[in-house]
Amino acid sequence: MTDQVLDKPIAETALHPLEQLAATNADSEIWWDSSPLIFPSWREETLAKAPEGKLAEWTAQIDRFYDAETIASQGTMGFRGVTTNPPLSLQAIRLAPELWAAEIKTIGAKNPGLDYEGVYWAMYLDLVKKGAAAILPVYEKSGGKYGFLSGQVDPRYVRDGDKMLAQGLQIYAQAPNVMVKLPGSKEGYEVLEELTARGISTNNTTSFTVPQYMRCMAAVSAGLYRATAAGVDLSKWRSVITHMSARLGELSDWKTEAKARGIELTLPEIRDGEEAVLKRAYHHGKSVGHPSKMLQCSMRVEKDERTGKTVSRHIQDFGGSDMVYTCPPGYIAQLMAVEHELDPFDANAIDREPNKASIEKLMKLPSFRQAYEFDGMTPDQFAHFGSFKATETEFAAATRQTVDFVRMTLEG
C-alpha cells in the first residue's frame, strides 16, 4: 500500500486494521463517524494512551486518516467521507461547550424572533456547515467523488414528510459537499426519492432490513429516472444505504422472541444473522447494478465465543467488498488496541456464505424473517421494527438534550 500523504511504501504490519481492510478492494471506503470538529481532541486523547513503542506508529496511522494541513494543501485524506448523527453532534457540542454557547448567543441575538427550537436548528445547520468546510478540499480535488459530510434531518420527525423535505433542502444548502441523511421510514423514502430527483446526494439511515434496502433502491432509481428526464446534473451525485449492524441484532426482538420459543441464541449466531442480512442486500444490489453503495456502521470489537479470538466480524466478514465503513472514534481506537490480535483480512470474505445452521435457527424468529426476507415487511411497518424504534428513541433523546443545551444557554 502507498501512503497518500507521504507517497512512500508502508509496511503491512504498520497499517491500521481499517487500512488493511480497505486494501482488499480499491473501491471500498473508510469514513469518519463523527464531526470533523472533534478530531483534534480525539487524536490527542488517543495518542496519550499509546502503548510503549507504539506512539510513532499510531501517530502515523491517525495522520494518514485525517490531517488538516494535508487536506488544505493537497485535498486528500484517508477518510473518504464523514457521517454525523444527533448523539455525535451532541458529543461535538459537549467537547467545546463554550464555543457553541457563544454561537447560540450570537444566533439568538441576530434572530430575536426565533424560539429555542429555531435557534437549535440554526446551530445544527452551522455545525453541518463547519464540518463540511473542513473537508471541502477533498470533495473539490476528487471531483465530487469523496469528501461528503452527511447531515441528518431531525429524528423527531421520521414520519413527517413535509418537515423532512424542508429540513433536507436546508441541510443541502449549507455546502456543496453535504449529503442529506434520511430515516428508513415510509415517509423517509418518499423524501429520499424527491431529493434524488433534484440531484441531491442522500444517506439512508436507521435502516436495518432487506425490505428497507429494497425500498431505498427503488426510491433512488425512481428519483434518478426523474432527474435524468428533467436534465438534472448528476455528475456529483452519490447515494449510500446504511446497515446499522450491531443495532440490528442487539436492539431488535430476536433475543426476546428466541427466549419465548425456548431457543438459545448465542452472540455469534446473532452476528451470523447480521452478516446474512447485509450480504443479501449487498449482493442483490450488485446483481442489478444499482448505483447506491451499502454503508456499514455500528460495528463491535469482541471475543468470539466459538474460537476465543478477538474479532470484529462486522468488518472481517466483508473483506473484498466495495462498501463504505463509517467508524466512530471509539471503534477506531479499539481496533488500534487489538490490531495484533486480529486475523488477516480475507479478500474473498464477502463471497463466503453465512453460517447455514444459524440462519436456519434464526428463521424461526418473526423479526428475523422481517429483516431477512425480501418481502418481510411493508413500508408502513418499517418505523415499527424493533431496531428502528430503539434507535429513533435514542436519537430523539439526544436531539432533545441539544435543544435543552440551547435553552439553558439562552436562559443564562
Image (cartoon, rainbow, N blue to C red):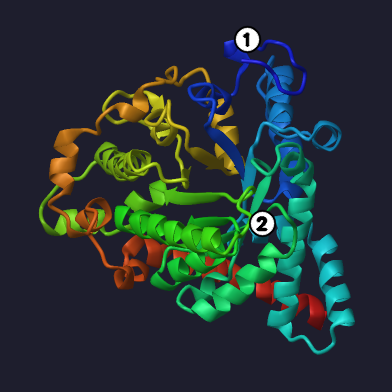
Residue at x 42%, y 63% (from the top left corner): 184
Residue at x 61%, y 60% (from the top left corner): 232
Check disc 1 and report the residue beneath it. Answer: 11
Q: Report x, y in % for residue 280.
A: 29, 42
Residue at x 37%, y 44% (from the top left corner): 285
Horizontal placement of 106 versus 408: left or right? right
Horizontal placement of 30 versus 263: left or right? right
Question: Which amino acid type is marked by label 1?
Answer: Ala
Residue at x 41%, y 68% (from the top left corner): 185
In the image, residue 269 above or below residue 226: above
Question: Which amino acid type is marked by label 2?
Answer: Gln
Check disc 2 and report the residue beneath it. Answer: 91
In the image, residue 386 above or below residue 13: below
Q: Nearer the viewer, residue 178 or 355?
A: 178
Q: Nearer the viewer, residue 399 or 376?
A: 376
Residue 298 visible in the picture: no
